[in-house]
Amino acid sequence: NAGVTQTPKFQVLKTGQSMTLQCAQDMNHEYMSWYRQDPGMGLRLIHYSVGAGITDQGEVPNGYNVSRSTTEDFPLRLLSAAPSQTSVYFCASSDGTVNEQYFGPGTRLTVT
Amino acid sequence: AQSVTQLGSHVSVSEGALVLLRCNYSSSVPPYLFWYVQYPNQGLQLLLKYTSAATLVKGINGFEAEFKKSETSFHLTKPSAHMSDAAEYFCAVNSWGKLQFGAGTQVVVTP
């Protein structure tokens, strides 16, 4: 079991560029989420999904897009990167609304 | 809306001393509460969770937390700190699968 995997581990973008952060899980979890972590702010929810084909916005969704075509994958797209999106991004999955969320190792993104 | 407040962004503790990390929550419904730990350059790992079965919850690595409804608190403790406990700790409340995190507490353990 690989758990939750994320690629890439590090990425540097220029303002205005787009990219996709990949997230995959092999635990057959229905719930998947994307969080961003910034110093002194904990983790904040960007988007989440309760199953294939179903997504919804979290606390800080602006500038990000998601889709969920399979149970395993939940990619996060940055449409036009901005310096304010410099952060560490974590993907998580869970098998229930009240159960533990399993986190990936994170992607450190810098936008210049 | 649910929220979580962690008192103290940094805590320094001597090796062998008590570790106490404070977490207060607000919730309009019985909460599901979690403590996660993050070691440097890693993802988050679950320490323990409260799901209304028992008010005193035991977790991994000797940590435990007590749910106090009257104080809306879920403080994390460990009787004797170890150097390996140096990490950042996050309290979180679960709202229908969405975690609301506190700002985190960085723990430094001194010899």
Image (cartoon, coloured by chain):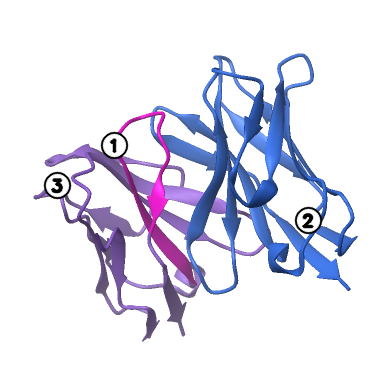
Q: Camera-side residue: A59 or A4?
A: A4
Q: What residue type is labelled 1?
A: Asp
Q: What stretch is highlighted in magenta?
A: A87-103
State the residue position of label 2.
B9
Residue A91 inside the magenta-drawn segment: yes
Left or right: where B18 falls relative to A82: right
Cα distance in 3D space between marks 3 and 1: 11 Å
The image's mark for residue A95 is: 1
Q: Which numbered disc covers residue A71?
A: 3
Letter of the chain in purple: A
Where disc 3 sits, the SS reads: loop
Estimate the x, y position of residue A31 in percent, counting from the top left. 28, 40
The residue sitting at 35% across, 59% down in the picture is: A63
* Residue B81 shows up from this direction: yes
In the displayed structure image, the side of residue A20 where residue B38 appears, left or right: right
Nearer the observer, A98 or B62 = B62
Q: Which quarter of the rendering shows the N terminus of chain A?
A: bottom left
Secondary structure category for the residue under label 1: loop
Label 1 resides on the chain identified as A
Instruction: Classify 10 Å Cα crowding around label 1: few (below 14), some (14-19), many (20 and above).
Output: some
